[in-house]
Amino acid sequence: MLGLSRARVEADRWIAFRSHFGIESFYCRPGIEGAHEKGGVEGQIGYFRRNHFTPVPEVDSLAELNELVDQWDLHDGRRRIGSRPRTIDEYFEVERPLLMPLPEEPFETGRLFTPRVDRYSQIAVRTNRYSVPVRLIGKRVRVVLHASHLVVYDRNVEVARHERLIAKGGCRLDLDHYLEALIRKPGAFPGATALEQARSAGKFTPVHDAWWAAAVKAHGDTAGTRALIEVLLLARHLPHEHMVAGLAMALRAGALTADAVALEARKIAQAEDEPAGTPGAGTVTFLHEWRLAHLPPDTRPLPSVTHYDQLLQRRRASGGEHREGEAQ
């Protein structure tokens, strides 16, 4: 190992990282001979671990842990090491002008993959599978894998984003990715794995189920399920909470069409956008009333019936002459 060149020993990602930031590598001697070369660095790492990671903090996500680390780091900047006269932050301010400026563009820390989308509209990344929109079946996509999530791109457009699976052999599906296929085959919707995952994640709520059951009762299995899928397609353009509230309003009113749900959801969104106390806020009930309320003022002059009055006068005069001729 020691006889190999540095380019063979270094990992490709490390080479890209230090090239991006302009870092010059310096390697300490291994074993006892080099133990004194970076004792200060190792000592501070041990201090941070003993004071902040003992006991191990309990968090719900990696993002929450990173936020805690940032807070601890800021707090440590205000302490003094030993009997030194300045804090860590004060020493850093002295050193800051001597440092090289950071690059304008951030360094991409994620791992890049280019899998092909299979016939189930899924891609394999490491040992797990993730869904993408059905229109991408058979195409190659670009995946950037991060520590806690992954992003899928079709060329340069983001088409999917998933929380990363930790265990091996897992599968994460997004119901929205399959809607175009399910609307053609609504019979496959009730047993879809993506639907069960959406329920577990709280995206498909009991309100969705209640509206779906009422739509099926009113329109039949196929038409009722297709109406629900149309509602889910509308959710791409409206916030989730507005769609759920719109479903609840439509269910109470017995309005079991996607258009009715969209109207109720937009009314709720409009009521939230308008400031409190605005005249007429939240009072619009029907679509035509909403349109009339938002029409610009009509500045045209009122129509005149003068020409019709002249016609009536001529008709009366000709009628009188006709009666006089009959009398003679």
Image: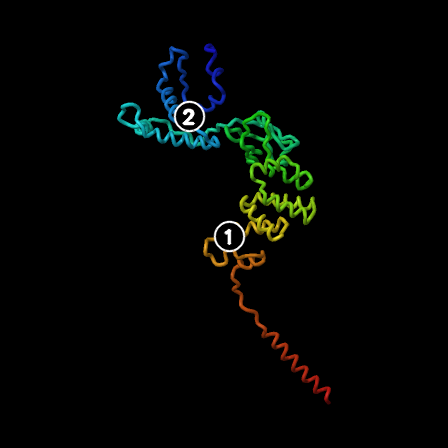
Colour treatment of the image? rainbow
Q: Amino acid at mark 2?
A: Pro
Where residue 129 appears, as percent x and y from the top left, is 60, 29
Residue 289 to residue 177: above or below? below
Choose top left, top right, bottom left or bottom right for residue 47: top left
Residue 54 to residue 246: above or below? above
Would residue 97 be seen by someone viewing this image from the given angle?
no
Instruction: Compute the Cα span from label 2 to label 1.
Output: 48 Å
> Which dot marks residue 55?
2
Residue that mark 1 sits on: 271
Q: How many marks?
A: 2
**Residue positioned most to the bottom:** 328
Where residue 296 appears, as percent x and y from the top left, is 52, 59
Secondary structure type for disc 2: loop
Q: Is residue 319 left or right of residue 58?
A: right
Q: Residues within 10 Å of mark 2 (few under 14, many from 20)?
A: few
Q: Amino acid at mark 1?
A: Ala
Choose top left, top right, bottom left or bottom right for residue 78: top left
Would residue 197 be seen by someone viewing this image from the given angle?
yes
Q: Nearer the viewer, residue 290 or 47?
A: 47
Residue at coordinates 28% horizontally, 27% vertically from top-left? 86
